[in-house]
Image (cartoon, rainbow, N blue to C red):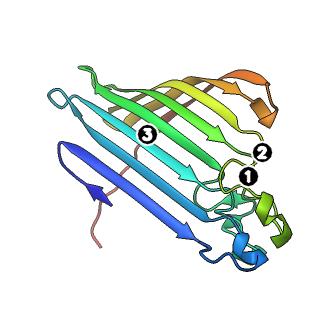
Amino acid sequence: VERRGVTTLFAQLMLDDIQYERQVATDLKPASYGLTLGAKGRVGGGVASWTAFYTQVANLTYRNEDDFQIPLFHGLGTGRNFADYDQATLKLGVLTPSGVLLQPELTLLRQGEGDPRLPHPLPPAYPTTATLFQGVVERTWRMALGADWHQGRWGVRGNGGVHFVSNAGHLQGASDTRWVGSVRVSYSITWEGRL
């Protein structure tokens, strides 16, 4: 769902396997869900924009008692590749006079130990299975800058940032600082003709 205007609101919600009765052991299974809520808009005369969003995916969202109903392909998720996390992001977009789009970003990511590749817990483990944030929660603060430039058929896109990680590797008290980045250069080829 998205509402467009000076400020645009957007939301997504996925519900799966919600237990409303609490009579037998299988009714204690934690809920599986995913949600995203956000807003975006313009700043000034239209050369700058902002986006803010929050997303959350529960621990068991991409797992199922039946292994044939798990949305994995060769161990990779067919949608989001992670579960048991939430993320809050604030991003600005500024178009410079030279045509470069700059995008500073600030993100907080909290990741539990739940993973779509892990086996689904058995019903006796449901009471001790968290709906969100199983085990030690890893927290990552990301400060990054992205840049995107296109001229004719050429394009260059890059993104780099520093990640400040606490409880790194889901180890209580461990910390880590990482630089993460990527650069992509592209050249577009087009061909037109009649059918």
The quarter of the picture where residue 119 lies is bottom right
Above or below, 55 against 159 in this view is: below
Number of numbered callouts drawn: 3
Residue 187, percent from left and from top: 43, 39
Pointers 1 and 2 in contact (C-beta within 8 Å): yes
Residue 66 in view (yes/no): no
Q: Earlier in the sequence, mark 2 or mark 3?
A: 2
Q: Where residue 60 sits: x, y (%)?
A: 69, 61
Residue 1 higher or lower than 110, as above or below:
below
Q: Residue at x 83, y 64 (%)?
A: 125
Using the image, determine if residue 10 lies above or below residue 122. Answer: above
Amino acid tagged 2: Gly
For discs 1 and 2, the disc positioned in front in the rendered view? 2
Residue 187, label in figure = 3
Q: Quadrant of the N terminus?
A: bottom left
Q: Which residue is mark 1?
A: 114
With 184 as the anchor, is 52 left or right in this view?
A: left
Spatial distance from mark 1 to mark 3, Cα to Cα? 40 Å
Whether residue 77 is visible = yes
Q: Secondary structure at mark 1?
A: loop
In this image, 96 relative to 128: left or right?
left
Residue drawn at x 81%, y 72% as measured from the top left = 123
The numbered mark at residue 19 is none
Q: Position of residue 27 (x, y in %)?
A: 70, 75
- The dot on residue 135 is 2
